[in-house]
Amino acid sequence: MSAVKPRVLQLGRLLPTLEARLAADYEVTLLAQQPDPRAFLAAHGREFAAAVTSAPVGIDAATLQALPALRVVSSFGVGLDRIDLTAAARRGVPVGYTPNVLNDCVADIAFTLLLDVARRAAEADRFVRRGDWLKEKFPLATRVSGKRLGLVGMGRIGRTIARRASGFDMEIRYHDRNVIADVPYGHEPGLLALARWADFLVVAAAGGPGSQGLISAEVLDALGPKGFLVNIARGSLVDEPALVQALQERRIAGAGLDVFADEPRVPDVLLSLDNVVLTPHVASGTIETRQAMADLVLENLRSFFERGELRVSAPLQ
Ligand code: 8YV
């Protein structure tokens, strides 16, 4: 790396170890720490060659515009729904991100939620802790092995979930814009038909305007009173009020949710329902995977400043 460290604008907080490594190689300014971020950008935006962000923070068109000397964006996460890729492409600014390294951990949480909500593990844990076992038997749960798994999205994470489902002898079908040639599972062009067929509907598609509210009241009714929903993708893909209502009225059997429409706020009703398992957007949250994501954020920057190209760049819009 050259003697003069490139100026990097860090939009939000990152892992402390990543922040330390960034600060060692670059001249970093944390936008979130500025008393008035907009005024700071207006005064100093032109000083930055790179921006580092994350999937939940993203970078919008106004921020991109406030950074006229920006040459590259490096984001921590696979989700691109909060990054204005069109504005970045118009400016010729490449965007690096961290796909693949999180597939296994995200698929593991999909299965954690699926098994938990079907076998009532968290509910059973609460039952034992309350001392209820001394008074009564815990109710029966739902079998997972051999059941039907409908995947909404057959990308990198979808296929990793499908491989785990094969270990449970599940029948697998998927709904995706495209027929994926190199997977052995049946493509279902209709989401309603997939929901009707499935015992478990697992959402593993990208967020963004194209998939907003995809899991509608109609889809939930197609899943039906014996069906379970699992979402490890984005809260925006699900019509959340419709989901809350369907769960309350037991029009679906249950849900395992890692993502929500307005994180970190979770609808109050969900907190009181026993047929839901809730996790706080932690699917990629293991030490090993977050480390691998951090490595890729740094590798993308290093590769860009040394060779003019990212290790892993977001698809062009
Ligand atoms: C977040 C995610 O990046 O990668 C994504 O798209 O949603 C997560 O892995 C993670 O919560 C870090 O902020």
Image: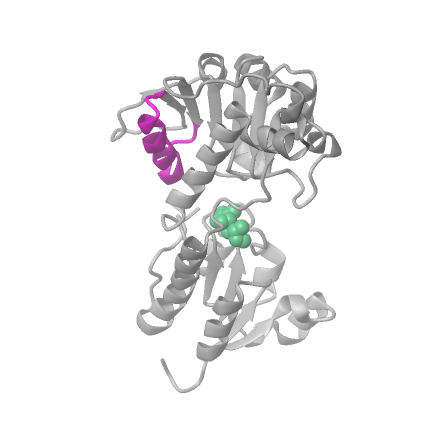
Name above or below for residue 208 compared with residue 80.
above
Judged from this view, the residue extending furthest toward the bottom is 3
155 in the magenta segment? yes
The residue drawn where x is 47% and y is 52% is 77
Nearer to me, 304 or 106:
106
The residue drawn where x is 35% and y is 25% is 168
Q: Is residue 86 visible?
A: no
Quarter of the image where the N terminus is located:
bottom left
Name above or below for residue 147 compared with residue 37.
above
Q: Position of residue 189 (x, y in %)?
A: 40, 19
Name above or below for residue 196 compared with residue 93.
above
Nearer to me, 271 or 102:
271
Q: Is residue 132 visible?
A: yes
Q: In which quarter of the image is residue 255?
A: top right
Nearer to me, 168 or 67:
168
Judged from this view, the residue extending furthest toward the front is 134
Nearer to me, 40 or 150:
150
Name above or below for residue 58 compared with residue 189.
below
Q: Give the range drawn in magenta.
A: 152-171
Main SS, magenta residues: helix
**Relative horizontal placement of residue 151, taking residue 31 as reference (left or right):** left
Q: Position of residue 63 (x, y in %)?
A: 61, 61
The residue drawn where x is 64% and y is 35% is 129
Q: Where is residue 210 in the image (x, y as percent from the top left)?
A: 53, 34
73 in the magenta segment? no
